[in-house]
Amino acid sequence: MGVRQRHFILFFCSMGSLHQSTTSPAPATKQEGIILSGGNIPDGISVEVFVPSTGKSCSLPSLPVGRAYHTMDGNLICGGYGISNCLSFSSGQWIITKTLLQSRYCHSSWQADQGLVLMGGDKPEQGYTSEILQMAGEQGESSFAMQTYIKWACALQDLTSDSVILTGGEFSSHTVSRYDLQGFVEDLPQLVVGRYGHGCGSYLRGDGTQVSVVYVFMVYSALMV
């Protein structure tokens, strides 16, 4: 999470408006893209979608208020500096659909089978706690305790089990830990280079081996899980 923080997810955006007009307008097509919302910029309300396959972007309606240091999963934006709710994109606008137990920011998020789990945050009362937002619920519920103070860590979805891998963090820069819905499971090999406010991702190889990548700027480390 740097000074110009934004978050991304996979999203579908109609790209018809980005193509040059013809006498017989082509129907809009759906392409996989990346959505970026808010951030620590002058107003923090803009939302846009970038489509890597075309190199083009399109805009979505702005957020009702500026948000920074939040998380985004699917079309659900949660938390942010001084904010204790979640927004969903519905019928062309962003609306409040869930309420958090507390204002939570600089946290990490994990889309588990039972709901969205928000972990850690900027303050000690956030950093050692987590809460879960059930799919059909509107109010956050207390979940498991964090093993360490989690702030500015990056969460990796385990692609082979219902668990999450937390990497780095301001107070745990070398730590790599696995959690499930019951809480802490295990520590994994530490990062070679301590990191926080970084990005991460994972993918499966053809043989089913999961590779997790932790990166900041153009430097990366690979973890075999």
Image (cartoon, rainbow, N blue to C red):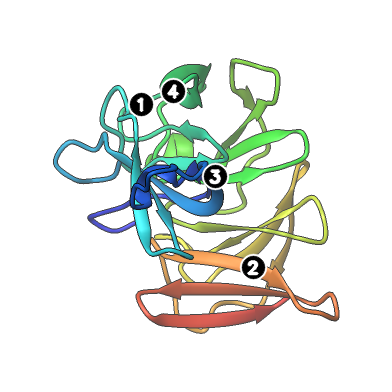
Q: Regarding mark 2 in the picture, which secondary structure is present there?
A: strand
What kind of residue is marked 3? Phe
Residue 181 occupies quadrant: top right
Q: CA distance from mark 3 to mark 1?
A: 27 Å
Whichever of labels 2 and 4 marks the residue nearer the N terminus, that label is: 4
Q: Position of residue 124 (x, y in %)?
A: 43, 40
Badge 4 density bin: few <14, some 14–19, many ≥20, Cα 10 Å: few
Query: In this rendering, does residue 77 appear at all?
Result: yes
Badge 1 density bin: few <14, some 14–19, many ≥20, Cα 10 Å: some
Residue 165 occupies quadrant: bottom right
Q: Position of residue 81 (x, y in %)?
A: 31, 34
What kind of residue is marked 1? Ile
Badge 3 density bin: few <14, some 14–19, many ≥20, Cα 10 Å: some
Residue 202 is marked as 2
Q: Regarding mark 1 in the picture, which secondary structure is present there?
A: loop
In the displayed orientation, state which residue is furthest to the right: 207
Label 1 sits on residue: 83
Whichever of labels 2 and 1 marks the residue nearer the N terminus, that label is: 1
Whichever of labels 3 and 1 marks the residue nearer the N terminus, that label is: 3
Label 3 sits on residue: 12
User: Do the numbered discs 4 and 1 sit on residues whose CB atoms are within 8 Å?
Assistant: no
77 left or right, relative to 181: left
Q: Residue at x 51, y 58 (%)?
A: 154
Q: Residue at x 31, y 52 (%)?
A: 5
Q: Residue at x 80, y 77 (%)?
A: 209
Q: Position of residue 86 (x, y in %)?
A: 47, 25
Whichever of labels 3 and 2 marks the residue nearer the N terminus, that label is: 3
Label 4 sits on residue: 92
Q: CA distance from mark 4 to mark 1?
A: 22 Å
Q: Residue at x 29, y 58 (%)?
A: 2
Q: CA distance from mark 2 to mark 4?
A: 31 Å
What kind of residue is marked 4? Gly
